[in-house]
Each structure stands twice: as structure tokens, then as C-alpha cells.
Image: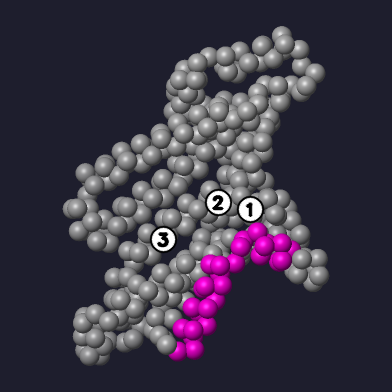
Amino acid sequence: MIPFIARRVVQTVIVIFAVTLLVFFIMRSMPGDPVVMMLGPDASPEQIAFYTKQFGFDQPLPVQYVKWLGSVMQGEFGKSIAYRQDIGPFIWERFKVTLTIAVPAFVISVVLGVLLGVAAAVRRGGAADSVITVMANLGMATPIFWLSILCVYVFSLKLGWLPVQGFTWPSDNLALAVRKMIMPVCILSLGPLAQFARQTRSAMLEVIRQDYIRTGRSKGLGERTVIFRHALRNALIPIITLMGIQLGHMLGGSVLIEQVYVIPGMGNMLITAILNKDYQLVQSAVFVIASGVSACNLLVDIAYGVVDPRIRIS
């Protein structure tokens, strides 16, 4: 098991390194000067030259990248050009907001999606199967942006049940925080929930046809024991795969949700940083997101090895 984990850790480090390298050179290839954008059009050449040297933008690109990566490895992310703040604490505050939205959405999508997928597989061809399949297809096909706008119009502007936008920490006002989170969390979980339901249904249909499932039933085991202890356990590998992918997407892909509901999370911050050509903030934010997504995939790979030992041998 240890060599298996070591190989996956090395691959994860290589992926994170490649992502940071790609983002660094893409940001540097974009038109515009971040120092000029920071100082404004009335800045003198002396001011521009001073801040260009202070941020290290006058050095060759490989030197800039190596210095930035070395600082990040020591836990020092530098200072944001646009926000004039230390990047480390600033990103951590935004990352906590994104986690507050993404984690409940992920839990809801996994629990409800798996249960609906099991129900559809067990009642294959019945009314419940048809309803769940249609709802899952609708959930996957509906654009998040359009659905977000529609929900704001119906539940906020017409019915007045929920706040239009914004974010409140549960420690400040629990009731208001929950009301503000209902729409973003539900919409963010909708697509993954549909995919979990479809994946679970497909995996369960293959498993419940196996001989050992029929044998278990013929021995008098209860239906819940057969389904949840034997069938679902053996259908877990594709579901675990999807869990890693979806959690990564939620951490890095909540940009639209944060824009529509004016949530000060990582996605919102990243868009502002790109528009301001805030090099260090963009690179650091992408580094954090890539590390989070890669960590999720690493945990999934390790879970593979635990669930099915044949995978770690191969």
C-alpha cells in the first residue's frame, strides 16, 4: 500500500507543478501592465519603474517563477497588487467562504444522489425509476446560470422567501446565514446530484444481476442487507471516482454561483484578480485550488486501493 500511495503523491506534486507553470506563463502573456493598472493613467515613469522593480517584474520570467515558487514552498504568497493585502490570509478567508457553500452542496449531492440511484435501480422500469431518471436528466441539462437567475426571480423577488444575494457567517447570524445559503447550495448541488443518481443506478444495475446477490436472497437475507451491505459496497468504485471529480469541480467551479449571489469566495476573487492582472494573487489562488483538487483525487486513488486491492497492485 505504501509504494502505491508514494506513486500517487509524486504524480500529484507533478500535476500541481505543471498547473502553476502553465498559469504563470499564461498570465504573463496577457496584454497590459499590472503596475500601470494599479497606479492609474496619471502615474509617472519613475513611479512605474519603482513599483515594477519592487514587485520583481523587471526580472526574467524564469527567475520570477522560481522566486515565486520558492516563496510559496515556504508558505509566503506575497502581497496582492489590487487589494494591497498579504495574499495568504486573504485567500484563506475567501477559501473558507467557498468551503461553506461547497461542502454542504457536496454532502447533499452525494447522499441524495446515491439514495435516488439505489431506489431507481431497485425499482427498475417502475414509476419511481422513470421519475428519477427524468429528474436526473433535467438536473444535468439545466444551465446553472439560468437556473440561478430564475430562482432569484421566483423565491426572492416574487415570493420574498429568501434574500436576493450576499453571504453571512453562521457565527454572526445563523438564521440569516442559512436563508442566504439555501439557493446557492441547492443550485450548486443539483448537477452533481443528478450525476450521482445516474452513476449509482448504472453501477447498481450491474451488481444486482450478479449470482452472489441472488445467492444472498435465496439464503433469506433481508432486502436492505442485500442492497446496502453487498450490492452498494461493490458498486462503490465508480461512485468514488465521481466523488473526487465533483468535489474538485465544486471547489474550483463555483464561479458562476458566487457571481450571481455576490458571495465573496474564491471564484469571485479569482475573476477580479484576473481582470486586474494581479499576477501573484491569481497564481496563488490557482495553486490553492489545484492543490485542493489534487488532494481530493489523491484521496480517491487511496480509497480505490482500500476498496479494491487489485488496483494498487496494477
Residue name at image x 76 percent, y 23 percent: 40
Label 2 amino acid? Answer: Gly
Label 3 amino acid? Answer: Leu
- Give percent across and percent down for residue 237: 32, 64
Label 1 amino acid? Answer: Leu
Residue that carries the numbered disc 3 in the rendered image? 242
Give the vertical position of 136 relative to 280 (above or below).
below
- Give percent across and percent down for residue 263: 68, 50
Disc 2/disc 3 C-alpha distance (Å) = 15 Å
For the residue carrying disc 3, how many other residues have a C-alpha within 10 Å: few (<14), some (14-19), or many (20+)? many
**Residue 206: within the magenta?**
no
Horizontal arrangement in the rendering, residue 172 relative to residue 123 (left or right): right
**Mark 2 residue element:** loop
**Residue 137: within the magenta?**
yes
Residue name at image x 77 percent, y 66 percent: 153
Disc 2/disc 1 C-alpha distance (Å) = 8 Å
Q: Which residues are magenta?
A: 126-152
Q: Nearer the viewer, residue 9 or 176?
A: 9
Horizontal arrangement in the rendering, residue 112 relative to residue 85 (left or right): left
Return the disc, 3 or 1, that comes first in the chain's sequence: 3
Residue name at image x 50 percent, y 63 percent: 192
For the residue carrying disc 1, how many other residues have a C-alpha within 10 Å: few (<14), some (14-19), or many (20+)? some
- Give percent across and percent down for residue 110: 47, 66
